Image (spheres, rainbow, N blue to C red):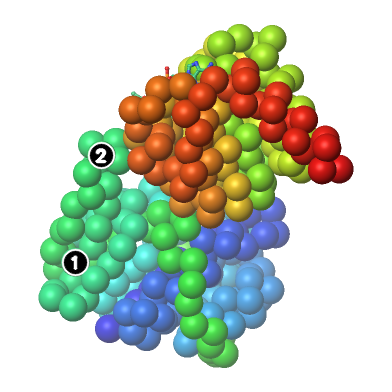
Amino acid sequence: MKVFAIAEHRFGELNPLSIELLNLANKLGESNAVVIGKDVSKFAEELAKFAEKVWKIEDASLENYTPDLYVDVLLQLINREKPDVVLVGNTAQGVEFAPYLAVKLGYPIVTDVVAVNTANGFVVSRYVMQGKIMVDLKVSTPCVLTIRQGAFKEGAQKSGKVLDAGIKPSKPSARKFIGYVQPEVGEVDISKAEIIVAVGRGIEDAANIPLAEELAQALGGVVAGSRPVIDSGWLPKDRQVGISGKIVKPKLYLALGISGAFQHVMGMKDSELIIAVNKDPEAPIFGVAHYGIVGNIFDVVPTLLDKLKAKK
Ligand SMILES: Cc1cc2nc3c(=O)[nH]c(=O)nc-3n(C[C@H](O)[C@H](O)[C@H](O)COP(=O)(O)OP(=O)(O)OC[C@H]3O[C@@H](n4cnc5c(N)ncnc54)[C@H](O)[C@@H]3O)c2cc1C
């Protein structure tokens, strides 16, 4: 099976998801990376460590991403090289051009794929109903798949060859690139934190957030929150964990007064160690926690702080 993985880069940095696409490509068959831009040699060399072949598509007009030019050059390459599967990152960029590409190719597309199984036909898995249910879909090839970040973290190393695809856009873009508008960046990136103290509605009030901050500081971690905490303005938006916030995988996730709604759990369930404190023994968070404390956070946290201080 010949697999194309369309790499993504911005501001001179390769999106690590590009390597995850190649991890999947290597599991499925012959891995080919495709990298598009003005001068992409640096990215091509990096991708060649994980791909059998890297196709470079370079042109001054490709300096900045535009969906029409990406689809234009990809159509030329795909129609010539005929891969069985085209993998695209399920990113803002990927979900914009991948459906357009699939329609132009006449291929089926499945978005936000988290698993691929070839034991019994070509079967892909994705979540539906806001993450409540996972479905398996049998897909005919050739096809286009967009892949969720974090789903294919492990993979084989390669030392592939870099090839110039010899392809240029067939026409100028109908869009003019004006500039990137960067999102506001908070001082803390919870998706990279190793220790997270997460607070839920059980924290009751903004005035109690410093208690969680003190615990986070004592543990060497950061504070995050469930959606009600963010919606109440007690923590900034970039601290929200869950399907409409950030996906986190810390070494320790301490959940304080969080019920464990699936929209929250989807964002933290892969944490290495989950400890939950909740006064309700029936709280669903205990279903995902490795250790649970049935108790009041306003008793448990000060006790924990005392123990940590004593230890230091
Ligand atoms: C489309 C959609 C997207 C969503 N996205 C997200 C998301 O990204 N992230 C997210 O978190 N939610 C999200 N939600 C909301 C989600 O459904 C839940 O409403 C939310 O996660 C609940 O937050 P919580 O656990 O803090 O509050 P609650 O469900 O109210 O739970 C509070 C918990 O604290 C416990 N408690 C109260 N006082 C104490 C105390 N003193 N000591 C110990 N325990 C105490 C209670 O027993 C309870 O279990 C989304 C919802 C929708 C519809």
The nearer-to-camera label among 2 and 1 is: 2
Res. 30 image quadrant: bottom left
Q: Which residue is mark 2?
A: 132
- Locate residue 237 relative to residue 312 in the image: left or right: left
Residue under label 1 = 123
- Residue depicted at x 49% and y 66%: 153
Q: Quadrant of residue 221?
A: top right
The spot of residue 191 in percent (x, y) is: 60, 45
Relative side of 14 to 6, left or right: right
Q: Is residue 27 above or below residue 219?
A: below
Q: Residues within 10 Å of mark 2 (few under 14, many from 20)?
A: few
Q: Earlier in the sequence, mark 2 or mark 1?
A: 1
Looking at the rendered structure, which numbered label has been put on residue 26? Answer: none
Decide: is 169 above or below 166. Answer: above
Q: Nearer the viewer, residue 200 or 188?
A: 200
Could you tell me which secondary element the residue under label 1 belongs to?
strand
Q: Amino acid at mark 2?
A: Lys
Counting from the top left corner in percent of width and height, residue 179 is at 65, 39
